Image (tube, rainbow, N blue to C red):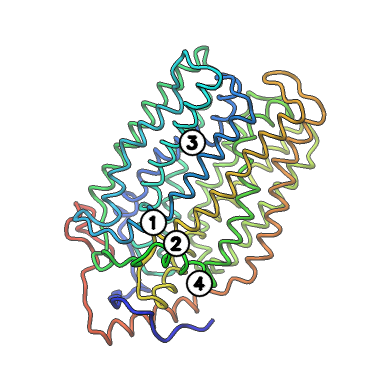
Amino acid sequence: MGTPDATNGGPAPPAPAAASAERLPLAVIWTYSLPTVGVGFLGMLFGVYLMKYSTDVLLIAPAAMGAIFAVGRLWDAASDPLAGFLSDRSTARRGRRRAWMAAAALPMLAGTVMVWSPPPGLEGLGLILWMGLAMLAWETASTVFFVPHGALGMELSRSHHERTRVFGWRHAIAAVGSAVGLAGIYLLRTSESPRFTALALALLGGGATAAMILFAAARLPERSDHQGRGAARIDKAILDVFRNPHARLLLFVYGIETFGAAAIGMLAPFVLQYVVGRPDQTEVFIAAYFIPQFVLTPLWIALSRRVGKKRLWLFSMVCQTLAFAGLFLVPAGSTFIIFGLALLVGVGGGCAAVVAPSIQADVIDYDELRTGERKEGAYLAVWNLVRKGSAALTPILAGVVLEATGYVPDADQNETTVFAMRALIGLLPASCYVIGTLIFLRFALGEREHAAVRAALDARARAAGTSHPDVNPSSGEAGREGPR
């Protein structure tokens, strides 16, 4: 990989102090990861059970609910670039990321309650319109939190491997919230008053999430030398992502894989009830998916140093390809095998969740060498745009296919519908992961290439004679400890 000799202008970045040896205090990483407990809880409810709750409790047609999901995700994806650009350019006293995080806290609570507790008297078109507006409110608030929070994680460290440690801990801590979310799904599934239970979970989960976000926003550090160093125009910021060959390749991988994988959470309750015949095992199935994501995180952090991030991510893709193919082929009622395949999907998914954002951060360093700018928000937003846009197609496809094949809520399904469910949760993602694996084999920004990028950035900073503090002085207790 060749590295550019000069930037396109803009302020020169400061040299990191011993970036290769940089190690963040656990207090900083845990504070950064804390909001993901609440977000993991809400994400579990939204991703796994909202579709079934909407069709079986609120009695919204599957195709209509699929369209609502799609519109919400498309809006979420479209608003990401604006949130990323604005947070990159922000010069707020509290920090360019933390101010946005704090602003998202209460709107996320409001959006959660709106989605899970529509007015009891609404039905038909009125209910569909309410759910559509509620999803837009939730997705907007989520964007205002997710993009700056993800960007801040990429800025906490400049070390190739320390970044994997940051995102590994974040993923493990988020899994705690997902586990609590499983309990929420069980309460919803077994409740005699599901609408009351949904409101209670929305208030408790949304309130706790808002509190965690506000706490993290008050305590986290930020690098003051990154303040206001985004692109001058949003179109330039987006075009720079596409001009970056490493980022461009990741866009293809994310788009293809997300289109397939988005079905597993949404369709798991349907498959467990109508294909496996064990709706009472829904939480066990999902737990089998999440347990390895939590337990194996330290292994992925250690292996990334030994075998490299690229090889580890390829391993995760192979695991998921085999597991999804198995979900399509496994005989109906083979509960033990299905749970084993869920474990294998969790192994691959957990591994990818640890190394993928760390690789993204390295790709953003390459952009800094080319442009002299720090655009974590723009990069994360464009990646999210592609992933969410792809994921938005999946609920449309699932809703249309289920309705076209004669899906009937809470009744035995015909053979065509059962086959469609198996294909959507197995064959579709397996095919997508095969294509994604073949594309990712061409990725060329490994540890040695990233070290060359960092060395060039450090040399440029020394030549410019710049020196900036690493941490925004307005940070709280965790911020004063700072990245080191």
Q: How far apart are marks 2 and 1 (CA)?
A: 8 Å
Mark in the foreground, 3 or 4: 4
Inspect the image, locate mark 4, and give the three-letter code of the amino acid beneath it.
Asn
Mark in the foreground, 2 or 3: 2
* CB under 8 Å between discs 1 and 3: no
The residue beneath circle 4 is 244
* Residue name at image x 67 percent, y 37 percent: 398
**Numbered disc 1: secondary structure:** helix
* CB under 8 Å between discs 2 and 1: yes
Would residue 216 appear left or right of 52 to someone viewing this image? left
Q: Distance between the residues labelled 3 and 4?
A: 37 Å
Inspect the image, locate mark 2, and give the three-letter code of the amino acid beneath it.
Tyr
Residue 84's tag is: 1
- The front one of 307 and 115 is 115
Across and down, in percent, residue 117 comes to 44, 22
**Numbered disc 3: secondary structure:** helix
* Residue name at image x 76 percent, y 33 percent: 334
In the rendered view of the protein, which quadrant contains the N terminus? Answer: bottom right
Would residue 209 appear left or right of 423 to someone viewing this image? left
Residue 379's tag is: 2
**Numbered disc 4: secondary structure:** loop
Looking at marks 1 and 3 on the same chain, the residue that comes earlier in the sequence is marked by 1
Q: Does residue 249 lie above or below 458 as drawn?
A: above
Inspect the image, locate mark 1, and give the three-letter code of the amino acid beneath it.
Gly
Looking at marks 2 and 1 on the same chain, the residue that comes earlier in the sequence is marked by 1
